[in-house]
Image (spheres, rainbow, N blue to C red):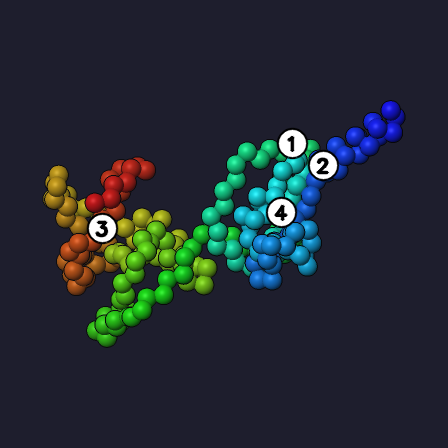
Amino acid sequence: RTMKKLIILLLLFCKTMAETYVIDGEQGNDDNNGLNSITAFKTIQRCVDELQNPGDECQIRSGRYHEVIHIDGLKGTSESPIVIRGYEDERPIWDGTVPIQPSEWEYDSSTGICEAYIDEDIIALFLNDDLLTAARWPNALWTDKTVFNNSYFAHCDESSSYGNIVDDGTGGGVGLADSGIDATGAMAILNIGSWVTYVR
């Protein structure tokens, strides 16, 4: 009986022992067992699908990962959380962006603007991991935080009325009418009060 109890305890221990899995987006393969860097999985989702017990880990090797991950019903404990982290001291990038590759660009030599049509909706645009600022008037940037500087905002003239806004000519040092910009079809972001913003 003692031997049977010992065998049962060993089986239970083996069944619930925490596992560490490795993901390598470049060299991995989802048909592997994922138990070390040589037999790493290729995708994060494949690893997540293996997580079962408190203390289980997915360790991700460096690289850029474009995945939608579904995690459902996993529960660790405060002492043994289920963890998804970088492998050793490597820093993988979990990238939610989508590369855009228009088939054709049109260049306007008079304005220096390049234009292309793409199928994807754009929420934000990045170049070399830097968030780009949408073309806007008055001009201001995220990189130097001038988008938060009131002196870079356009301001309403006192002659403005409900449904008719007239800028006072100080936006970026020049009024919209004098800027030469055709704002037809443009989107206006209006800060009409403290922390109150409308988009029209």
Measure the C-alpha gap from mark 4 to mark 3: 43 Å
Say which mark, if any, is on residue 134.
Answer: none
Dot 1, crowdedness within 10 Å: few (<14), some or many (≥20)?
few
Which residue carries the number 4 mark?
58
Q: Secondary structure at mark 3?
A: loop
Mark 3 or mark 2, which has the lower sequence index? 2
Mark 4 or mark 2, which has the lower sequence index? 2
Say which mark, if any, is on residue 77.
Answer: 1
Mark 3 belongs to which amino acid?
A: Met
Contact? badges 4 and 1 (CB < 8 Å): no
Measure the C-alpha gap from mark 4 to mark 2: 18 Å
Is 81 positioned to the left or the right of 194 in the image?
A: right
Q: Nearer the viewer, residue 92 or 159?
A: 92
Which residue carries the number 3 mark?
187
Q: Residue at x 65, y 31 (%)?
A: 77
Which residue carries the number 2 mark?
15
